[in-house]
Image (cartoon, rainbow, N blue to C red):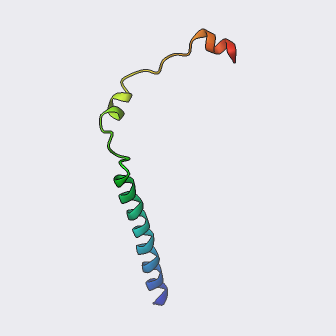
Amino acid sequence: MSVIILLIIASVSIAGIFLAAFCWSIKDKQYDDEYSPPLRILFDDKPASATDSDNQ
């Protein structure tokens, strides 16, 4: 029975660490850009020019 209590304490501690990391990333404004990710898929990457491939 004591093993279950230790596992519960360990899982709650790990969940708390992940919650703290998530709150820290929100506070650090990691999720503020809501505009460009949906539009990024609509535009192709610029093709490499012929001079770029010659230099490699």
Percent of width and height locating residue 29: 35, 48
Q: Quadrant of residue 40?
A: top left
- The residue nearer to you, when weighing 17 against 10, is 17
Percent of width and height locating residue 14: 45, 69
Which residue sits furthest front?
28
Percent of width and height locating residue 41: 38, 28
Can you say whether 38 is above or below 19 in the image?
A: above
Can you say whether 44 is above or below 49 in the image?
A: below
Q: How many marks?
A: 0
Q: Quadrant of the C terminus?
A: top right
Percent of width and height locating residue 42: 36, 24
Left-right relation of 31 to 49: left
Which residue sits furthest bottom?
1
- Residue drawn at x 62%, y 14% is 52
Q: Quadrant of the N terminus?
A: bottom left
- Residue drawn at x 39%, y 64% is 20
- The residue nearer to you, when weighing 13 against 55, is 55
Left-right relation of 42 to 14: left
Q: Quadrant of residue 43?
A: top left
- Residue drawn at x 38%, y 63% is 19
Q: Quadrant of residue 49?
A: top right
